[in-house]
Amino acid sequence: MRWYQRFFRRELTERKLDAELRFHLEQQIADYVAAGMPPDEARRRAQQEFGGLEQMKEECRDVGSAHFVETLFQDVRYGFRQLRRSPGFTVIAILTLALGIGANAVIFSAVNGVLLRPLPYPNSNRLAQAWSTNPHTNRWGDWVSYPDFVDWRAQNKVFEDLVAYRTWLANITGGDHPEALFAVLASSSLFSVLQSQPLLGRSFLPDEDKPGHNRVVVLSDALWRSRFASDPHLVGKAVVINGESYTVIGIMPPRFRFPLNLPEGLPAPSAWLPLGLDPSQSDRGSHNYRVVGRLRPGVTVSQAQADMEAIARNLAQVYPADESLGVKVAGLEENVTSEVRPALLVLLGAVGLVLLIACANVGNLLLSRAVTRQREVALRLAIGANRSRIVKQMLTESVLLALIGGGVGLLLAFQGLSLLIKLAPSVQRLHESTVDGRVLIFCSFLSLATGILFGLVPAFQASRTHLNEALKQSGPSRRLGSGPRLRRMVAVAETALALMLLIGAGLLIRSFVGLSNVDLGFNPRNVLTAMIMLPESRYSAPNRQAAFFKEAIRRIEALPGVESVAAADSVPLVTNDTGSVSVEGQPEPTLDGVGIQAERPKITPGYFRAMGIPLLRGRTFTWADNEISLPVAIVSEAAARLYWPNEDPIGKRVSESDESEGRIVWRQVIGVVGDVRQDGLADKVRPSVYTPLSQLPMPFAALIVKSRMDPSSLADPVRRQVMAVDKDQPLFSIQTMQEVVADSVSNRAFQTVLLSLFAAVAMTLATIGIYGVMAHSAAQRTREIGIRMALGAQKRDTLRLVVGQGMFLALLGVSIGVIGALALTRFMSSLLYGVKPTDPMTFIGVSLVLAAVSLVASYVPARRATKVDPMVALRYE
């Protein structure tokens, strides 16, 4: 009979079992009678060999799976009754576990969404990114020249196809208002490589890469809805982008986004256009493109790397511009998440430690609770229960606690993940994170493992109860085997784990404080920035670009509260333009054999005043420094030290190596200004060479407005003055420089806050653990303390005894924790700035703080122990 039939038809099963056993007993009796034994002796002999009938039934039941299910249900019901019987213990344990499991679920959801979930393209594991490498420059990136892309595409044997793309800023006009358009220019193979098709219309055709045929555009779902009111007939119609007509050929699905490896802070692309004609497409030295390809079935990234390296070697022999170039191939998923991966894994490890500490705390609670249940366990053993049955019951209760805690933690995770996404800075794909099936499986497994982890030792301890002693004792305070020793070991482990987290948080805090105190080189206070993109169709002439910026600046300067206005194509911490700089009469400067790239901002007069950058020597630019005047430049202090050490740079000449389409234009240095951190607060200061925007005009620039009031209040007035100069010219990415600075460290700030929060929770749990151990120990030693005091011991002696025991545990935990932290903090090196992973000040400071907190946790029960009345203590138990 199947187990479920035996389980649900129990009466019938019991009757059949009784009949079968009695049959075997009678059969044995009959065999003895047949052998010549008297009937009474035969029955007595058979019963003696056969054993008790009820015992045989129990053994038979134990063999069957139905009995396992039945006893499991019994254990669960009994476990629920025990948990209801101790509501205080149950609530504390559940909340402690919910906190640990919930935190793990939140961070795992983020890890799952960012690192584990495939990219939103079919067979995304076959997508790879390839880029040129150059060991002779101190700044490169994942860029490729268009001629190299063409050769890679034609010669490789590992990719089904490759696509080259770059981002593009443009203006879309027509309708009620102009709007800035963040778009992607890509080769026609873009959508075929991604195996993604528009929701409406079609994708690019191969011929639409050619000049004259590239006036088509594919729009994003968001732009289609916001600007065109979800017009289903938009496909086939024309839109005006940068003053030129483009035909809409497709609308992408809502969830489509490419590229995924954009720098932080940039918006999602709103449109995709064919590359068409780009002057840099014929320049092998102009690395302006990113390249992504789809690997052929069965081809690995390492095989693709080898094939592309062979192509790069061949190109280096043919083209001088490729002589120093190599190639790197990496999976697109890996490349997209490479920057955020270390931080997420550190946070996942941190919440894992928090959960271990929570388990230790609950385990300590169970060990303490087991003391009060000695008589119950002894009675169950006395009436026939075996030790495995006791262990199973105790484990069932701990798993019940963990599952309930996991359920509550999962509810907390839904809210916690929403809060994490809302508060977190811009992280690739974080907004896609959800509590999905994988997270549910993770939580279920974690809850089950947690229940077994913190319940196993207390269960074995409870099963080792000494039957006679437990039944004879008159109170619940007798020690349970090695329980006190285990509780002290758990407290030591909690302290060690908490110290590891605290040291990690301390390193991040010191790193963040150091980063916040870095000298920016400019004053972000009361400065507003707004990006602007002049369409080449209307502003191709350099004098028209300069005239636009000059008139816009004149109008904005007239606004109330404005101190200074300027424009620049590079804004510190937002955008930059780096490249080689030639110095007249000198070879190219290098560092350890690597060419040094310099920042090369193009600025208007008033830039240094608006940004608060000090002029150290010489003069600044004026509007007289235009296209017909002497070419001039201003260098930073770092550039002056690098290019002309121990010399006065004023009057020296420099040139941007790639300006004016390769024609060398020597610029006379007319001033020296302070250094500015252009890339980021954690990056080293680069040399900077500033040129007048009117001498080397750029269609893209940022307006920089210095005010005497809240700069954000000037956003609308500035926008109106720009549109007064050109009604089709929108502003975008309007923000204050203080917001820019805050955004530049937002990732580090968020990581620091999260890890500090986890560390604070860990320290709280560890403190509670030490307090619990010492309070329980003091209560167990009440009689001993009373005897000591009756024999003349002073209160300070008792205080020293209890506090000394607690501090021994704390210091032992701190010592182990320091060793563990030395091993683990080395994985945090990429997250630190100005602080070593083994920073002695952090290790010593955090250890002292945790020791002080442990001292307080030990002092409270010690103080209570000194108030014991000797007479009461002598009558204890």
Image (tube, rainbow, N blue to C red):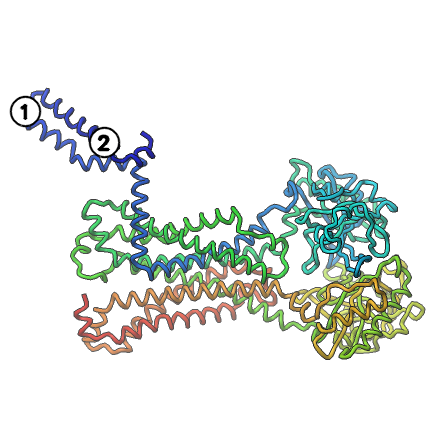
Q: Nearer the viewer, residue 499 or 860?
A: 860
Mark closest to the chain's N terminus, 1 or 2: 2
The answer to whether 391 is drawn above or below residue 587 in the figure is above
- On the image, the x and y values in percent for residue 751 come to 57, 62
Disc marking residue 332:
none
Regarding residue 615, the answer to whether it shows in the image is no
Give the quadrant of the N terminus.
top left
Which of the 4 quarters of the picture holds residue 780?
A: bottom left
Q: Relative to 493, does residue 322 appear above or below in the rendering? A: above
In the picture, which quadrant includes the C terminus? Answer: bottom left
For residue 537, say whether it is visible: yes
Q: Secondary structure at mark 1?
A: loop
Amino acid at dot 1: Pro
Which of 623 and 342 lies nearest the eye of the viewer? 623
Label 1: which residue?
A: 38
Q: Is residue 279 left or right of residue 108?
A: right
Q: Percent x, y for residue 626?
A: 90, 70
Q: Position of residue 251 (x, y in %)?
A: 73, 47
Within 10 Å of the Cα at label 1, are there few (<14), some (14-19), or many (20+) other Cα atoms? few
Q: Residue at x 78, y 74 (%)?
A: 608
Circle 2 is placed at which residue position? 17
User: Left or right of 815: which side holds 567?
Assistant: right
Query: Crowding at label 2, few (<14), some or many (≥20) Cα neighbours within 10 Å?
Result: some
Quarter of the image where one finds residue 51: top left
> Is residue 397 found left or right of 152 in the rendered image?
left
Specify the farthest residue to the right: 628
Inter-mark Cα distance, 1 to 2: 28 Å
Image vertical order of residue 323 relative to residue 851, above or below: above
